Amino acid sequence: MSPYAALALSGDTKTASDILDKWGADVFVMEIKKCGEVLQCHQCRAVCHKYGNDNQCRFLVPHEIVEASHFDPENNTVIFVCHDAIVNYFNPYLLVFCRHNHDLKCILSGKGAKAAVKTMHKYGI
């Protein structure tokens, strides 16, 4: 465990804001990078190729590199920045404070929203 994680878990702090105040921005960025390298890099496994996705990862990895977030009026979607094709989309605060992998995707409309609704229905969420 990093000394910064130990500080976060010690009884000296009450909230994430307290931890961030003690760490400072440089330490928080370092923790994001450390956790991201270990937890957020996608590695294709058998589950990635289920449901007829023999030649492509069903999680659409590698992602398309996008230099800047923008709105695509043709598809009526917001395209978010992506600097690394194999890193799962993540929330830096969840990553650092929970220290687990996760994959976040904005599902305002379109195929993403439809897939999310199907998944929630399937699992009764």
Image (spheres, grey):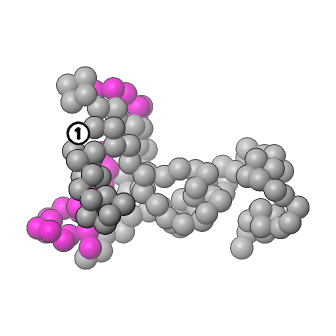
Look at the numbered disc 1 and give the secondary structure of its residue.
helix
Q: What is the quadrant of residue 66 in the picture?
A: top left
- Asked if the magenta segment contains residue 120, the reply would be no
- Asked if the magenta segment contains residue 57, the reply would be yes
Residue reaching furthest to the top: 73
The foreground one among 91 and 35 is: 91
Q: Is residue 99 above or below residue 24?
A: below
Q: Going 65% across and 59% down the picture, which residue do you hit?
A: 97
- Report if residue 3 is visible in the image: no
Q: Main secondary structure of the magenta part?
A: loop
From the viewer's perspective, is 71 left or right of 7? left
On the image, the x and y values in percent for residue 109 come to: 28, 37
Q: Is residue 59 above or below residue 79?
A: below
From the viewer's perspective, is 23 left or right of 65? right
Q: Going 20% across and 25% down the picture, which residue do you hit?
A: 74
Q: Going 37% across and 27% down the picture, which residue do you hit?
A: 70
In the picture, the quarter occupied by the C terminus is bottom left
The foreground one among 91 and 24 is: 91
Q: Crowdedness of circle 1 by 10 Å Cα count: few (<14), some, many (20+)? A: few
On the image, the x and y values in percent for residue 10 come to: 83, 67
In the picture, the quarter occupied by the N terminus is bottom right
Residue to which mark 1 is pinned: 110
On the image, the x and y values in percent for residue 80 come to: 39, 37
Residue reaching furthest to the bottom: 46
Inspect the image, locate mark 1, and give the three-letter code of the amino acid beneath it: Gly
On the image, the x and y values in percent for residue 52 come to: 11, 67
- Report if residue 123 is visible in the image: yes
Q: Which residues are magenta?
A: 47-72
Residue reaching furthest to the front: 124
From the viewer's perspective, is 51 left or right of 90? left
Disc tally is 1
